[in-house]
Image (spheres, rainbow, N blue to C red):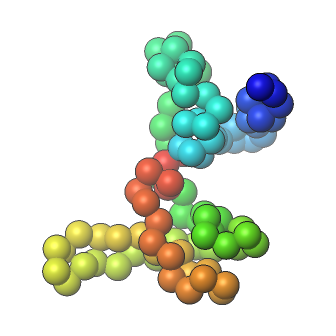
Amino acid sequence: MSHEPFRRTLRRLDDEPPVFFADEVERHLSPIRERLVSLGLLRETTPATSVPCRHCGHGHVARVGFVRSSRTGRMHAYLPCPECGPVEVRPDHLKR
């Protein structure tokens, strides 16, 4: 197994601000996530307001819109992708 994705993710620590998205943490850092949190090296910050489309191969990035369900009253996040149309975004995909 290649460690390159893990190394590439950790190189993001040099970015300002050093932000990882929840799916990156799950994919590359999950084995050591709790340790990083306990050491204060990793913490959750404000949710993302723009995300890439996960359904098309183009990775269109757009601002997330929220719509309240008339049936349940709950808010749902949607991405307006020009290729796929409106795509629902899971709340955990907005975590950073």
**Front position in the image: 47 or 74:** 74
**Front position in the image: 95 or 89:** 89
**What residue is drawn where x is 43% and y is 60%?**
90
Q: Which quadrant holds residue 22?
A: top right
**What residue is drawn where x is 56% and y is 81%?**
80
On screen, residue 74 versus residue 44, left or right, reads left
Instruction: Classify 82 as above or below 38.
Output: below
Q: Which quadrant holds residue 50?
A: bottom right
Residue 27 image offset from top left, x and y in percent: 61, 37
On screen, residue 72 versus residue 13, left or right, reads left
**What residue is drawn where x is 75% and y is 72%?**
58
Residue 38 image offset from top left, x and y in percent: 47, 15
Instruction: Classify 94 as above or below 69.
Output: above
Residue 61 image offset from top left, x and y in percent: 68, 70
Total labels: the figure holds: 0
Task: Say which quadrant the C terminus sits in.
Answer: top right
